[in-house]
């Protein structure tokens, strides 16, 4: 009987991940086709970064783009992307060479985009692993997280470094949650090694990954302070000191280089931006906080900001897909902590673990919000893509919110998926690429077929996910039912799952 339940659970896992991959693949196919190669100068600069690495050097701001095969017109000959760390571009280098991008730029860029797509698939798979450690068990919420991650419309389908940074934040969260759940008795050497590697490379993904990295390291340090009687010097060395030191050593050269070139460690060029782009606005932080459009745009994680937010349905999309689900998630977190506090004498370990993980999500969300507000107040963009960095935090919180209701979640999750699909189809209607003056106007049969295949994949994946939630909910919770083991009491079964949420 136990083998049957485990097999059923594994089948449910595979089915959910497959549905998530279908949703993501369809959205990516639609988006990458409607965004032709080198359509954006930003993508041209990303490819140029890779090209300059193949020439043996990093790009510079005033050096401009050295690889512009389509001769795109741009009023300023500068390399915006020079300030980004090189890890993503190093990983793209083999695809640049494999596609012979120098001589066949279109073929090459499709291969480079394929690598970004593979990063997205990896993110979906990793998100399930993260959810298992964040929630402390295989629960309903664990199976919802990959669907939410796959539904994020801010993951790029072009050669941008956001997906790698988002993946790395998920890895940081997963490792941190696993350490919190297993330290010290069940923490394996392989986990320690993987944690060191993930932290060490984090600063080389994006600058905005560094605060998340420090937050995760801080959570591990707090855990060991709380459990000081069990934490040895070796633990402090392997889990806190060594990862941070290696991270500094691996990336300090790059940020020192930025400081030498720009006068700051971020690589920004405020004087040039002020004189050429007119970025002289510096509104008060209070005004930035109270600007409604900032939240409307930055929280547009699950619909296309540029097309939907300009319509009368913009706020409806933000509230139904992001804000209300996030509020439900906050409620779930509060309920979990209150429940653990009430049973403190029985679940001391659970209280510590759940509190640390909830605080980790909370600080990551509000820290990212503050970071973007500071950028926005200096005339920066409120683009939702910047919040995609913490896609895993959105997914964990929303999944916890839906699944706190033991029966109602079977309605909430399908309703959310249907609303998500509806706004995706609205985006398709607004941005229909074959219309006059659209990028695919006049395209042939193959392009038409691929676009319709992408739309079909999103639809099939959504329907499959809804059916899984509606009909196979018990399979998703097989390992956590109170009658898992009929030979022990209900109270003993509950004790097996104390380290869990929601």
Image (cartoon, rainbow, N blue to C red):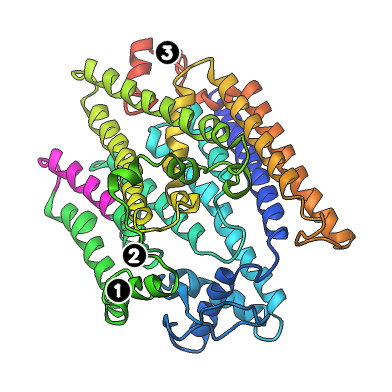
- Magenta segment main secondary structure: helix
Disc 3 packing (10 Å; few <14; some 14–19; many ≥20): few
Q: Quadrant of the N terminus?
A: top right
- Asked if the magenta segment contains residue 218, the reply would be yes
- Asked if the magenta segment contains residue 57, the reply would be no
Q: On residue 255, which mark appears? A: 1
Count the numbered circles shown.
Answer: 3
The magenta stretch is 214-231
Above/below status of 80 relative to 402: below
| Picture quadrant where residue 122 is located | bottom right
Instruction: Say if residue 227 shows up in the picture.
Output: no
| Residue at the spot of label 3 | 487
Kindly indicate whether the residue at mark 1 contacts the one at mark 2 (C-beta within 8 angstroms).
yes
Estimate the x, y position of residue 168 in percent, counting from the top left. 42, 56
Q: CA distance from mark 3 to mark 2?
A: 50 Å
Q: On residue 203, which mark appears? A: 2
Q: Nearer the viewer, residue 274 or 37?
A: 274
Q: Please give the name of the residue rendered at 85% of the width and 63% of the height, measured from the top-left corner.
A: 443
Above/below status of 288 relative to 213: above
Q: Quadrant of the C terminus?
A: top left
Kindly indicate whether the residue at mark 3 contacts the one at mark 1 (C-beta within 8 angstroms).
no
Q: Earlier in the sequence, mark 1 or mark 3?
A: 1
Q: On residue 32, which mark appears? A: none
Q: CA distance from mark 1 to mark 3?
A: 60 Å
């Amino acid at each position: 009987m136990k083998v049957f339940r485990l097999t059923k659970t594994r089948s449910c896992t595979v089915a959910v991940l497959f549905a998530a991959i279908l949703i993501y693949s369809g959205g990516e196919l639609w988006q990458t086709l409607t965004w032709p190669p080198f359509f954006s100068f930003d993508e041209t600069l990303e490819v140029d970064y890779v090209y300059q690495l193949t020439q043996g050097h990093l790009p510079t701001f005033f050096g401009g783009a050295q690889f512009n095969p389509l001769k795109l017109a741009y009023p300023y000959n500068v390399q915006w992307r020079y300030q980004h760390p090189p890890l993503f571009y190093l990983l793209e280098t083999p695809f640049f060479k494999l596609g012979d991008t120098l001589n066949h730029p279109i073929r090459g860029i499709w291969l480079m985009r394929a690598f970004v797509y593979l990063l997205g698939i990896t993110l979906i798979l990793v998100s399930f692993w993260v959810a298992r450690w964040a929630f402390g068990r295989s629960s309903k919420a664990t199976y919802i997280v990959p669907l939410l991650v796959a539904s994020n419309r801010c993951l790029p389908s072009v050669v941008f470094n956001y997906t790698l940074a988002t993946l790395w934040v998920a890895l940081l969260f997963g490792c941190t949650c696993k350490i919190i759940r297993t330290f010290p008795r069940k923490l394996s050497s392989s986990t320690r090694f993987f944690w060191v590697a993930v932290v060490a490379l984090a600063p080389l993904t994006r600058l905005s990954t560094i605060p998340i990295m420090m937050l995760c390291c801080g959570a591990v340090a707090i855990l060991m302070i709380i459990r000081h009687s069990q934490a040895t010097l070796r633990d402090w060395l392997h889990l806190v000191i060594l990862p941070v030191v290696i991270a500094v050593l691996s990336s300090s050269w790059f940020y020192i280089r930025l400081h030498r070139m720009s006068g700051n460690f971020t690589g920004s060029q405020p004087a040039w931006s002020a004189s050429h782009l007119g970025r002289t606005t510096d509104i008060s932080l209070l005004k930035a906080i109270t600007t409604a459009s900032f939240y409307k745009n930055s929280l547009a994680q699950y619909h296309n900001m540029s097309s939907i937010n300009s319509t009368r349905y913009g706020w409806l999309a933000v509230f139904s897909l992001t804000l209300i689900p996030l509020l439900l998630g906050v409620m779930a977190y509060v309920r979990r902590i209150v429940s653990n506090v009430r049973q403190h004498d029985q679940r001391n370990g659970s209280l510590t673990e759940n509190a640390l993980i909830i605080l980790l999500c909370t600080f990551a969300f509000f820290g990212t919000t503050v970071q973007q507000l500071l950028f926005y107040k200096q005339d920066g963009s409120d683009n939702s893509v910047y919040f995609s960095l913490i896609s895993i935090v959105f997914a964990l919180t929303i999944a916890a919110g839906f699944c706190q209701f033991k029966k109602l979640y079977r309605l909430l999750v399908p309703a959310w998926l249907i609303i998500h699909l509806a706004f995706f189809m609205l985006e398709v209607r607004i941005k229909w690429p074959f219309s006059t003056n659209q990028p695919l106007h006049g395209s042939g049969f193959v392009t038409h077929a691929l676009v319709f295949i992408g739309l079909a994949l999103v639809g099939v994946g959504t329907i499959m996910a809804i059916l899984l939630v509606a009909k196979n909910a018990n399979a998703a919770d097989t390992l956590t039912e109170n009658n898992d083991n009929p030979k022990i009491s209900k109270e003993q079964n509950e004790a097996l799952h104390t380290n869990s949420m929601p």
